[in-house]
Image: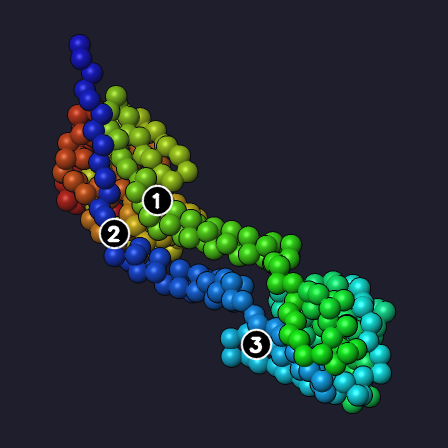
Amino acid sequence: MNEKPTRVFRPVPVTGPARLWFAILVAVLGVPLLWLLFELLRVPTIRYVVDSAKLTISSSLGSSHQEKTISLARIAEVRPEWLRDRSLRFGTEKPGYCVGFFAYPRLGEVFQISDCSSLGVFLASSGEATPVVITPADRDGFLKALNAGRTATFAPPGKRTASWWLTLATVLGILLAVVLVLATIFFVAPARLSYAVGGGTLAITTLLGRRAMPLAGVRAMLHRPLLGQRLSGAALPGYQVGSWMLDRMATTVLASARDQDGVLLEGDGRFFLNPLDREGFLAALGAEGATIVTDTALRRR
């Protein structure tokens, strides 16, 4: 004797709210991350210009611009310096852009315009309240030009540091994770929800697994429940899976929505489902051993 083929039923589609909430949450969570990514990818401009009378130090990042001019005649000390263990006092510190007041264990407080690299130049001037730290790529060339008063322009190394790459990878990872999690919640979960009837069993597929229910002794009927509070589970657009108080009774909901006509199953527990083809679903349940209740007086109790 040939077995009856398994029939698969889909729940009522609820796509509009899912798409709306997906767009809202992507905007709320994703836009700040995209802004941070944009800030990371922006290239700052830092220049150290020497001429016969002065040293001009400038930086720009977007709309932010800093410039300092130091008279060569007032420079009291200039030397190469190894920059370690800085702490920001006031200003901007992001990968590849350190501009503002910083403190170092060896140097104390300094004003710094640099790319945050560790090979720098320390300058003390009688015209400055605090020493100045910069990071020209060609330190020796910069020191020679400064001592000779020779016109020349220098810039930091401009290489992306390990911290920049780590920050970039972290931001990209979080952004990707946010999109994947939201897509799973609002699209993958509703797409997986289905009802398969065959072999005397109703098998319900959810996001996290598959639940089989023997149909012998189960009563099934068309039903629109009286809504109550959620006890446990997920309440998402297009994916309502968990335990609710429906019709003042604890009910396991395995549906795309709870406020629509669906099918109520009573047996070893109380279950509410909302297949798109309710009549066909009931007929399939009846063919596999469930008792179909048609008395309208029994549909809402």
When the figure is inspected, residue 47 is found, relative to residue 207, above or below; the finding is: below
x and y, in percent, of residue 131 in the image: 79, 80
At horizontal 62% and vertical 59% (from top left) the residue drawn is: 159
Q: In terms of sequence position, does the residue under pointer 2 or pointer 1 come before the other?
A: 2
Horizontally, residue 77 falls left or right of residue 274, namely: right
When the figure is inspected, residue 288 is found, relative to residue 82, above or below; the finding is: above
Q: Residue furthest top?
A: 1
Residue 116 quadrant: bottom right
Q: CA distance from mark 3 to mark 1?
A: 45 Å
Q: Report if the CB atoms under discs 2 and 3 are less than 8 Å apart.
A: no
Query: Dot 2 lies on which element?
Result: loop
When the figure is inspected, residue 202 is found, relative to residue 180, above or below; the finding is: above
Q: Which residue is mark 1?
A: 188
Query: Dot 1 lies on which element?
Result: helix
Residue 267 quadrant: top left
* Residue 95 seen: no
Q: Which residue is mark 2?
A: 14
Q: Nearer the viewer, residue 96 or 94?
A: 96
In front of the other: label 2 or label 3?
3
Q: In terms of sequence position, does the residue under pointer 2 or pointer 3 come before the other?
A: 2
When the figure is inspected, residue 133 is found, relative to residue 170, above or below; the finding is: below
Q: Which residue is mark 3?
A: 60
In front of the other: label 3 or label 1?
3
x and y, in percent, of residue 8 in the image: 23, 32
Q: Amino acid at mark 1?
A: Val
Q: Residues within 10 Å of mark 1 (few under 14, many from 20)?
A: some
Residue 163 quadrant: bottom right
